[in-house]
Image (cartoon, rainbow, N blue to C red):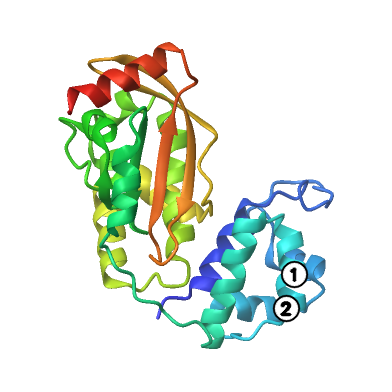
Amino acid sequence: MENLLGDFLRARRQATTVERAGLLRGTGNRRTPGLRRDEVAMLAGVSVDYYIRLEQGRERSPSDAVLNALVGVFGLDHEAAEHLYELARSARGSFRRTHVADRVCPSVLRLVNNWERALAFVVNRRLDVLAKNAAAAAFHEGLSDSDNLLRLTFLNPASREVFLDWEREARFMVAHMRAAVGADLDDPSVLALVEELSLASEAFHHIWGNYNIRIKAPDMGRYHHHRVGDLTLWLATFAIDGATGQRLFVAHAEPGTPSDDALARLSASRR
């Protein structure tokens, strides 16, 4: 089994600067990006040997006190901290996988389809698009790989024209799947998608290796559609009760703006 807890700790250690951790940089060049293991151990109040065992997967029962200390050392936000706790539960053997269904319930489908002046779609934790409204269907029209947001972003070159802030969108998509999958990364369908994207996209391989965690979408995004032009949209995501792993994505515009008019035209084109 993959050492998910160790992988996460290593990635966060390498991404944490000595300045962020409140340490003096000192003289000379550092061969290690971010913090050294002994520095993390010192800041977390554990022995160097204990922390090395954590990263190597030989210590599988870190206490809550140790986890809380590591949250502070790495400056983890709420989402990343929750991910760390889940990985720790998995390492202890106390994580139970829940069945993830891809069927969207009828009431959610009605909600999605009733959203007329917004892009609305439902995804699972792999970011497969399970349902979309008329505006979202029109927005994705003609784009290959639009059945999965990660494939669309990393495998379709046109995505760099559609997502005007492509790198931010790409980093969010990867961090979102990391958070959604959590400690269940050994799911064969998830592993297959990660392998496919890692082999086909160097950008995905690099971003995946950063091990960032994020569920909440950026507040605003900028997009381009070949028929209606540029759109500035406010973004939100919502967990769907009773459907583990499913989330509703909604993108809408300020009323009366050109972006709002563009969304209305997209929706009307699919009726």
Q: Position of residue 244 (x, y in %)?
A: 40, 67
Q: CA distance from mark 1 to mark 2?
A: 6 Å
The quarter in which the C terminus is drawn is top left
> Which residue has dot 2 on it?
64
Q: Position of residue 250 (x, y in %)?
A: 42, 39
Q: Which mark is residue 180?
A: none
Asked if residue 172 is positioned above or below residue 141 in the image, the reply reads below
* Label 1 element class: helix
Name which quarter of the figure residue 266 lies in. Answer: top left
Q: Position of residue 227 (x, y in %)?
A: 23, 15
Name which quarter of the figure residue 145 lies in. Answer: top left
Q: Position of residue 39 (x, y in %)?
A: 76, 64
> As shown in the figure, which amino acid type bears the numbered disc 1?
Asn
Q: Is residue 93 visible?
A: yes
Asked if residue 61 is positioned above or below residue 262 in the image, the reply reads below
Q: Nearer the viewer, residue 144 or 212?
A: 144
